Amino acid sequence: MDGIMQQIAEHKGCGTSGGSGKASCGSSAGSGDLPTEIWEKVKNHPCYSEEAHHHYARMHVAVAPACNIQCNYCNRKYDCANESRPGVVSEKLSPEQAAKKVLAVASTIPQMTVLGIAGPGDPLANPEKTFKTFELISRTAPDIKLCLSTNGLALPDHVDTIAGFNVDHVTITINMVDPEIGARIYPWVFWKHKRYTGVEAAKLLTDRQLQGLEMLTERGILCKVNSVMIPGVNDRHLIEVNKAVKSRGAFLHNIMPLISAAEHGTVFGLTGQRGPSAQELKALQDSCEGEMNMMRHCRQCRADAVGLLGEDRSAEFTTDKIMAMEVDYDLEGRKAYQEKVEEERVAKVAAKQEELKILAGESSDIKLLIAVATKGSGLINEHFGHAKEFQVYELSTAGAKFVGHRRVDLYCQGGYGDEDSLETVIRAINDCHAVFVAKIGGCPKNDLIKAGIEPVDQFAHEFIEKSAIAWFKAYLDKVNAGEIVHEIRGDAEIRQGALINAA
Ligand code: CLF
Ligand code: SF4
């Protein structure tokens, strides 16, 4: 492993925005504790930097329909679960249509910085379409980063081509390094015109995945490993996976919850295999964090997703619409916009650092979670009733650290509140002590208070971390004064069924 890759492997903190005093990848200080060339690669990639994901968008083009393996959490009718929610892909695109779509989106969303190919099958099981798309885009939109997500089976055969197209971000989904466990996840793989099953299939897959990872990191390509957490199958084993990928130079590990519902028609869905709870997922991510950088802001997006992570603007860019659009690819305009975004980031981090000073000298062991309604830019700028997800931060005397998100049903149904939705919202953020919102109505406010979750609207349109730190300091003061007793909250639910409706 060369020096840079060694530094990558040893770096911890990407995907965190912790106030420990140690700069994370998302630090506005620029490189933080990363080598400059790595910082340049991650600073505006919304998946590789938690801090960047509040400001920068990505898009996927669904040019890769075929797959060369079968995962028990996948149904071919739906998007690849490696990188997508199990919603139907609206349209498959030719490379030419994909290139036009990228220009159309880049002209409309100047903070869209990354083009990913993530399905709906496996990009490297469709190498011609995948690389043709990259070729067209690198010619017409040179400022856009190219990104790829694969199951890894065909990866070793394509590493040189990937490097040749300057694709400097590759994700490999690695769910096991033990073929016995793999045989419970993968019924078959198809390689060199032959179908393999059982342990033999899983052995072939894990060998090829790890070989591909090593080949990429040797070439200085940043690699992220996605793992699906399947309770009772690979949950404990993912600690071993984490060590295996770290030792091969992976930059980031993204442990995602299994999405499993009978209506998805997957093997796991039909056999009743459950996904993890919010606290089970967090505990596993926490236990791996000492080993390497953990991603916690993944939205398990569709293979045709467009926009900030957590928002979906794909309906604005259907093939009909993009073919009719006048595209004005204004490179200078995009740069100017992104410079403004950078100024906003600097202001946000400066505000957080300033506020952190009020926690200096505090010695409490209290750690708690809060949920935040946000539309992006690191601000508390969403109404409770309009939130489709809440971002979750862990507060401690070290500051505010992003630890995940919870997707929810919309509470506001056009003028009235839906009580059933409110119950699901409360279940999704039940492990949080407070929910920060730009605005909230009287009814949900009372129900939240009854559930032990404090609705906080006094920081509307202010920066999240700065506000969270100020609220936490006041909370500690009240505990210290005996005005309130700190209580541990319970677990929360990761919503399963609703993902299918997002198609
Ligand atoms: Fe797409 Fe994946 Fe690239 Fe990101 S997504 S190919 S690295 S640009 Fe990101 Fe979406 Fe999670 Fe993937 S949030 S599913 S990690
Ligand atoms: Fe489905 Fe992706 Fe697995 Fe292929 S690699 S079976 S498309 S989840």
Image (spheres, rainbow, N blue to C red):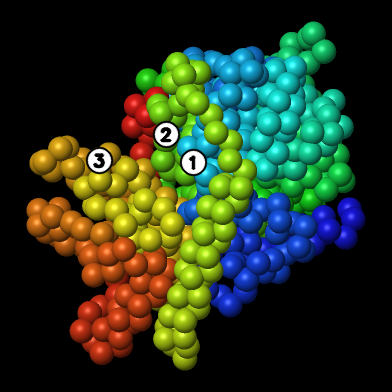
Mark 3 CB within 8 Å of ligand 1: no
Lower position in the chain sequence, tag 3 or tag 2? 2
Please state which amino acid type lies under the numbered disc 3: Leu
| Mark earlier in primary sequence (2, 1) | 1
Residue type (three-letter) at the residue carrying disc 2 = Arg
- For residue 202, side relative to residue 113 (left or right): right
Q: Which mark is residue 109?
A: 1
Which residue position holds label 2?
313
Q: Residue at x 50, y 18 (%)?
A: 323
CB of mark 1 near ligand 1 (< 8 Å):
no
Disc 1 residue crowd, few under 14, some 14–19, many 20+, Cα 10 Å: some
Left or right: where does residue 296 sit relative to residue 436? right
Q: Provide residue 459's location: percent of width, then percent of height.
A: 28, 69
Q: Quadrant of residue 439?
A: bottom left
Mark 3 or mark 1: name the one nearer the start of the chain. 1
Q: Secondary structure at mark 1?
A: loop
Separation of marks 2 and 1 at Cα, in angstroms = 10 Å
Kind of residue at disc 1: Ile
Mark 2 or 1, closer to the camera: 1
Whether the residues at callouts 2 and 1 have beta carbons within 8 Å, the answer is yes
Q: Which residue is mark 3?
A: 410
**Which dot, 3 or 2, sits closer to the camera?**
2
Q: Residue, x 55% and y 26% (percent of image)?
A: 101
Q: Position of residue 140 (x, y in %)?
A: 68, 31
Cα–Cα gap, marks 3 and 1: 25 Å
Residue 291 in view: no
Give the camera-side residue of 63 and 173. 63
Q: Which of pointers 3 and 1 indicates the residue nearer the eye?
A: 1
Query: Residue, x 70% and y 18% (percent of image)?
Result: 129
* Residue 467's disc number: none
